[in-house]
Image (cartoon, rainbow, N blue to C red):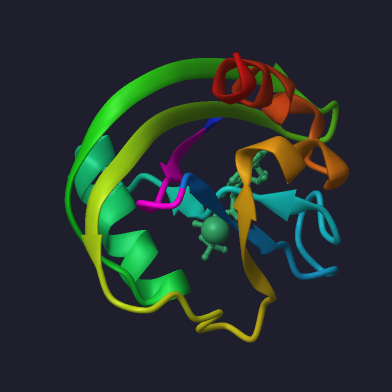
Amino acid sequence: MSKQIHVAVGVIQDSNDRILIAKRPHHLHQGGKWEFPGGKVEKQETTSEALIRELKEEVNLDVASTTPLMEIHHDYGDKKVFLDVHRVTNFSGIAIGVEGQRVEWVKISQLSQYEFPEANKVILEKILS
Ligand SMILES: Nc1nc2c([nH]c(=O)n2[C@H]2C[C@H](O)[C@@H](COP(=O)(O)OP(=O)(O)OP(=O)(O)O)O2)c(=O)[nH]1
Ligand SMILES: [Mg+2]
């Protein structure tokens, strides 16, 4: 059995109640779908530290702090993930797809128009509730 991958996932909300999403490059696992930016937590890091690092690397945002929102365990068959989802409300900078990926600020009411990985269903339910 393969071990699950610990992923820090950021729900980043701006002052206009929009949420930042990014398109996963096609060659990656769950490629072509939209995601909340984030990435793997490294051994010596807390989830918050990993998220702060990943959000700078991936979308150029400077995040001051994060707060836990929910934890999701999901088995895709080819990969098991543990999504450690945090909320980010305190950030600065302009969002850019640093790795060439599309990024969009989307109104919460419009989020269901986008295709997300299966594990994200519960995150969307929580944000929309
Ligand atoms: N970032 C992110 N990953 C998600 C979401 N939903 C979801 O199932 N995942 C899965 C897809 C991947 O299997 C895993 C994230 O791994 P990844 O390989 O993209 O992580 P990473 O950004 O650190 O990538 P790398 O630079 O280490 O290659 O989590 C989501 O909303 N955001
Ligand atoms: Mg990533």
In this rendering, position of residue 20 left or right of residue 79: left
Is 12 located above or below residue 119 in the figure? below
Is 104 located above or below residue 19 in the figure? below
- Rendering quarter of residue 1: top right
Compare residues 25 and 106 and report the one nearer the observer.
106
Is 102 located above or below residue 37 in the figure? below
Total marks in image: 0
In this rendering, position of residue 57 left or right of residue 52: right
Residue at (28, 76) in percent of width and height: 93
Residue at the left extreme of this rendering: 64
Q: Is residue 1 visible?
A: no
Q: Give ligand 2's quarter of the image.
A: bottom right
Compare residues 27 and 59 and report the one nearer the observer.
59
Quadrant where the C terminus is found in the figure: top right
Residue at (49, 81) in percent of width and height: 96
Compare residues 80 and 9 and report the one nearer the observer.
9
Query: Where residue 35 sits: x, y (%)?
Result: 66, 50
Residue at (64, 86) in percent of width and height: 100
Q: Main secondary structure of the magenta part?
A: strand
Tell whether position 47 is magenta.
no
In this rendering, position of residue 57 left or right of residue 39: left
- Please report the bounds of the magenta region as a residue range: 6-16
Tell whether position 15 is magenta.
yes
Q: Is residue 100 visible?
A: yes
Query: Where residue 87 sits: x, y (%)?
Result: 35, 35
Residue at the front extreme of this rendering: 16
Residue at (42, 48) in percent of width and height: 12
- Rendering quarter of residue 63: bottom left
- Rendering quarter of residue 8: top left
Query: Where residue 81 sits: x, y (%)?
Result: 61, 29
Query: Where residue 108 sits: x, y (%)?
Result: 62, 39
